[in-house]
Amino acid sequence: MKIRVEPDLSWKHKNELDMKKVRVFAPASIANMGCGFDVIGLALDEVGDILEITAIEGDSLTIINKSGVPLPDDIEKNVITPVVRTFLEKIGQKAAIEVVICEKIYPGSGIGSSAASSAAAAYGMNELFGCPLSEEEVVICAMEGENLASGGYHADNAAPAVMGGIVLIRGYEPLDLIQLPVPGNFYCAVVHPHIVVSTKEAREILPKSVPMHDAIRQWGNVGGLVAGLCTGNINLIGHSMQDYVAEPYRKQFIPEFDSLREKILNAGALAMNISGSGPSVFALCDNKAVAETAGKILQEHFDAMGTEAQVYVVKVSNKGAKLMHITL
């Protein structure tokens, strides 16, 4: 599939801007971590999107999908488009940009598919043009893709996809990002059942207001999670990852969610929650062996229902978007 808007990538037409090319990776991510709706997210190791971005003299955007994952034919519906445009506006330049999507997380997976593409595009553009933007400004560019995907500017996937690790978004006006410590032995078992739940649908099902007693419990858990991460208190981290705002409504998308969580916790996981808007579910574990056991339970749960599912057992990563190769 090729999405094209007046491209001009011929060497014959280059003038002031010589051809430059980068190959970049941005990781999958898990938003919310239970209690941290829209304000906490973590990066996953190994899984993510790979883009190749080329720039020469001109004023156009071409997106070519070689990932094998179906994406919108309309360039205006691709999350990469607003990211690239916003970046060029911020630095006050024009260029002919070609983006090749080499590897892609399946959309609707619940592990930050739109954020991985948005973060890779923002990070790659910044590298391509000599890093004129700060890390926080790169996240802001990536949030443009998230807005297109979900109808809101949130950074709980975009920030860890750019920065790596576990990130707290203390505020949005202005954006205030705080990187939290990641215990060295943290692993996640993540299952992506092949059930499509759009981020917009998952957000629309949520109530417009939250009862005070639920809000108080949620605030306490967010504070407990941050304190647990900062002090290395593993039990506090697990106890704090309870969601009273989104999960009670979103768990209906995931068959037998409560019974699955009981099995996962009995196997020794610290917590089990919906990953972002779902339908993916993740189990946070303090060692690889427990994570592998949790992964098997997650796989068996959906196999028994006849639902195709993909399971990842990966370390919580301190690494965010990274440059894989550059050609000047």
Image: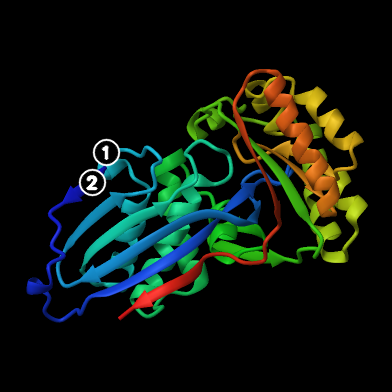
Q: Earlier in the sequence, mark 2 or mark 1?
A: 2
Count of marks placed on residues: 2
Q: Give the residue pinned by disc 1.
A: 73
Of the 4 image quadrants, the one containing the N terminus is: top left
- At horizontal 39% and vertical 78% (from top left) the residue drawn is 132
Give the alpha-carbon distance from disc 2 to disc 1, as whole Å.
6 Å
Q: Residues within 10 Å of mark 1 (few under 14, many from 20)?
A: some
Q: Amino acid at mark 2?
A: Ile
- At horizontal 61% and vertical 46% (from top left) the residue drawn is 38
Q: Nearer the viewer, residue 244 or 327?
A: 327
- At horizontal 71% and vertical 57% (from top left) the residue drawn is 316
The image position of residue 274, as x and y in percent, is 68, 36
Res. 3 mark: 2
Q: From the viewer's perspective, is residue 22 above or below residue 235?
A: below
Q: Amino acid at mark 1?
A: Asp
Residue 230 in sight: yes
